[in-house]
Image: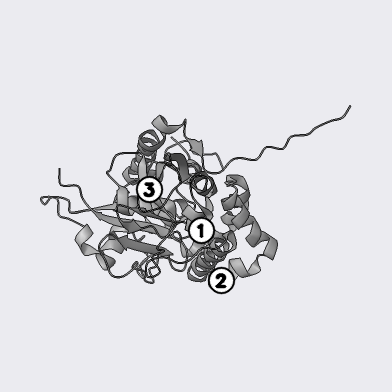
Amino acid sequence: MADDKDVLRDVWFGKIPACFTLSPEETTEREAEPYYLLLPRVSYLTLVTDKVKKHFLKVMKAEDVEEMWFEYEGTPLKWHYPIGVLFDLLASNTALPWNVTVRFKNFPEHDLLHCPSNSVIEAHFMSCIKEADALKHKSQVINDMQKKDHKQLWMGLQNDKFDQFWAMNRKLMEYPTEEGGFRYIPFRIYQTMSDRPFLQKLFRPVSPEGHVLTLGDLLKELFPAAICAEDEPKRFQVMIHGIEPLLETPMQWLSEHLSHPDNFLHISIIPAPSD
Amino acid sequence: QAMSLSITPAQTAAWRKQIFEQLSERSKREMENFMHYEQAIEQSVWVKKGTM
C-alpha cells in the first residue's frame, strides 16, 4: 500500500500541458508560433511564464507591448489563483493540451490584479499562508518562524524544490493529537458561474460530539446541491487537484495532504458533463 | 510492545484507496503523453568546474 507521503509528491509534481497562442487581436510583425509548456499545478501563471513572454515578444514591436495577461475561451485567468484551480474550474473534461491565449493589450482591470513583479506573487502567497495559519493555529506557527523560514517556503515554490518547501511546511501541518486536527480547516470553494469569487467559512475538522467531519459534511453546509441522492444523476463534480475525492474523505486528511502550498484546500465545483 | 503487522482500517478505507487511484490516473491523463514538453521551471544544477 502506498504511503500518504506519496500523495504530497503527486500533488506537488502535478503538471498540466498547455499550448499558449497569441491573441489575433495583438499586432505582430510576423506570425507567432504557439508555445508549449508543462505548467506546475500548484504554482501561479505569472510565476512560470517568463519563457512564454520572451517567445512572443520576439514577434512584437515594443510599443505594442503592455502587461502580459492570459485568457481561456474569453475568460481572463486570475494569476492569483493556483494554476491547477484555474484548469479544474474552467477546462476540466476538455482535450489536452490546455489552450491558453496570451494578451499584451486591453488589460481587464475589473477582472485581474496587476502583477508587475514576482514580489507581488510572493506577497500574495505569504498572505494566504498567514491567513491559513491564523485559521489552523491562531497564527502561532507562522509567527514563530523566522523571516528566512518564510523565504524558504516561497523559494521552495518558486524553484520547484519539494524538499526545501516541505522541510518548513511540515511545521504548518502539525496539531495537538488530543484535538484531532487543526482549529479550523483553511478551504475555498470555487464555482464556475458565480458573482462571488469563492466561498469560505469557519469549519472545524471534528464535530462538537467528537465525530470526524468529512468533505460531504462541508458540502452539506456550503453547497448542498453538490450532493446527490443515489437515484439521481450527478449534477456537479467536486474537484481537488483534478481528482474527485469521495465524500467520506475526512477534511483534516484533505487539509494535510491535498492543500496547495498556500496551505488552503482549493475545491472547484463544476457542472457534471452531460454525456 | 510488538509492532502490529495488521492493516489498519485507515489503510483500507475506500476513500484513501480512491485518492491514490485517481492521482495515478491523473498523472497518466495529464502528463504521460506530454513529457516531451518543456518544463516551466528549469531545475538548476550545480556544476563544479575544476581548473586542475
Q: Nearer the viewer, residue A84 or A135?
A: A84
If you read the primary sequence from the N terminus, does the residue marked by circle 2 or circle 3 appear first?
3
Q: Nearer the viewer, residue B6 or B37?
A: B37
Q: CB atoms at circles 1 and 2 under 8 Å apart? A: no
Q: What quarter of the picture does the C terminus of chain A occupy?
A: top left
Q: Amino acid at mark 1?
A: Glu
Marks 1/2: CA–CA distance = 46 Å
Label number found at residue A100: 3
On the picture, is A114 further left or further right than B46? left
Query: Of helix, strand and loop, which one carries label 3?
Result: strand
Tell me the crowding category of disc 3: few under 14, some 14 to 19, or many 20 or more residues within 10 angstroms, Cα based.
many
Give the percent coordinates (x, y) of residue A273. 19, 47
Q: Is A144 situated above or below A158?
A: below
- Viewer-side label of 2, 3: 3
Q: Is A252 situated above or below A199?
A: above
If you read the primary sequence from the N terminus, does the residue marked by circle 1 or circle 2 appear first?
1
Give the percent coordinates (x, y) of residue A102. 41, 51
On the picture, is B32 further left or further right than A227? right
Q: Amino acid at mark 3?
A: Val
Query: Of helix, strand and loop, which one carries label 2?
Result: loop
Q: Chain of mark 3?
A: A
Can residue A237 be seen by looking at this rendering? yes
Residue at which label 2 appears: A139
Query: Of helix, strand and loop, which one carries label 1?
Result: helix
Give the percent coordinates (x, y) of residue A225. 19, 61
Q: Amino acid at mark 2?
A: Ser
Marks 1/3: CA–CA distance = 23 Å
- Viewer-side label of 1, 3: 1
Tell me the crowding category of disc 1: few under 14, some 14 to 19, or many 20 or more residues within 10 angstroms, Cα based.
few
Residue at which label 1 appears: A63
Q: CB atoms at circles 2 and 3 under 8 Å apart? A: no
Q: Chain of mark 2?
A: A
